[in-house]
Image (cartoon, rainbow, N blue to C red):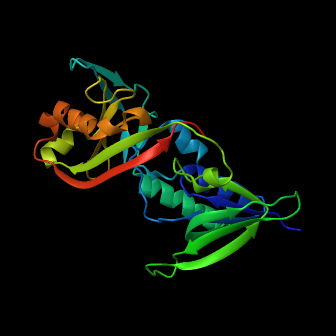
């Protein structure tokens, strides 16, 4: 009998799992609620990820070789990559996620545009799991209720994981990320052509750091903090906007994003 596996969530983790399963000849179903979804992620990826995930050049918006670390007192430390073949890849999550998802589907994973809302867990080791979901593939506002029986499930559906709740995985910590995409005037964008910035200080992030990362035709300006400080996320975003105000002058906000992010798998 062919093993049937459902992967819920088609971010990098879910799509990579679905790709591996499909390559192994396993009957694979990859669920994604929003095919155009883009998490508020700085989008910086290390060079090792480019090779390990076999990413083509068009996935990378910019190859950044200069980084500024900026202290709470605005002292700047320059970090430059010396080797010509080394860089930090800057990508947009919707581009990266879409590529990995489509690659998994091209290798045999069955991509389902749907919202998973319930899971029937078997009471023995032989019966399958039953996934209850609403199929959005036909574009209707309400979708079509359907079910699917599988032998195993991988929950890769983020901090608000329906699968984690259904299997009673318990509490887990998560962070909140907030990001604005800003299209800058040409002279301001030129400053970030080969440069990314990371800011630290309680005014921009109580726990982590804030960033200004260049993308294809804009910069991503964002911050993150743990869930206990989530009420202050907009204040922290105002902090990074203030710290980088001179460099962002004249910019136009083209997208605002916020989302919880799991701290651990």
130 w.r.t. 139: above or below: above
90 w.r.t. 73: above or below: below
What residue is shown at x 80% (from left), y 65% (from top)?
128
Q: Can residue 58 be seen by looking at this rendering?
A: no
Quadrant where the image shows the N terminus = bottom right
Image x and y of residue 233, in percent: 31, 38
Image x and y of residue 39, in percent: 42, 51
Q: Can residue 259 be seen by looking at this rendering?
A: yes
What residue is shown at x 41% (from left), y 44% (from top)?
43
- Looking at the image, how many numbered discs can be counted on the residues? 0
Question: In the shown orientation, is residue 150 left or right of residue 206?
Answer: right
Q: Quadrant of residue 135?
A: bottom right
In the foreground, 144 or 186: 144
Quadrant where the image shows the C terminus = top right
Image x and y of residue 54, in percent: 58, 49
In the foreground, 261 or 30: 261
Question: In the shown orientation, is residue 34 left or right of residue 163?
Answer: left
What residue is shown at x 45% (from left), y 53% (from top)?
59
Q: Quadrant of residue 207?
A: top left
245 w.r.t. 100: above or below: above
């Amino acid at each position: 009998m062919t093993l049937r596996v459902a992967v819920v969530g088609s971010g990098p983790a879910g799509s990579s799992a679905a790709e591996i399963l499909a390559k192994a000849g396993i009957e694979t179903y990859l669920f994604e609620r929003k095919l155009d979804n883009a998490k508020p992620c700085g989008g910086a990826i290390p060079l090792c990820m480019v090779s390990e995930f076999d990413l083509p050049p068009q996935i990378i918006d910019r190859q950044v070789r200069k980084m500024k670390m900026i202290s709470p007192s605005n002292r700047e430390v320059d970090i430059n990559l010396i080797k010509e073949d080394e860089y930090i890849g800057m990508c947009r999550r919707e581009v990266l996620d879409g590529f990995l998802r489509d690659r998994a589907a091209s290798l045999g994973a069955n991509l389902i545009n749907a919202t998973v809302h319930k899971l029937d867990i078997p009471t023995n080791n032989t019966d399958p799991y039953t996934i209850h979901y609403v199929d959005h593939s036909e574009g209707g506002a309400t979708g079509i209720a359907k079910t699917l029986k599988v032998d195993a499930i991988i929950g890769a559906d983020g901090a608000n994981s329906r699968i984690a709740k259904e299997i009673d995985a318990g509490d887990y910590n998560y962070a909140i990320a907030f990001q604005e995409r800003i299209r800058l005037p040409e002279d301001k964008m030129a400053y970030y052509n080969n440069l990314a910035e990371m800011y630290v200080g309680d005014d921009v992030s109580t726990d982590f750091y804030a960033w200004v990362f260049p993308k294809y035709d804009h910069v991503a300006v964002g911050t993150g903090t743990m869930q206990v400080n989530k009420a202050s996320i907009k204040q922290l975003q105002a902090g990074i906007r203030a710290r980088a105000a001179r460099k962002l002058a004249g910019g136009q906000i083209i997208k605002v994003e916020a989302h919880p992010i799991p701290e651990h798998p």
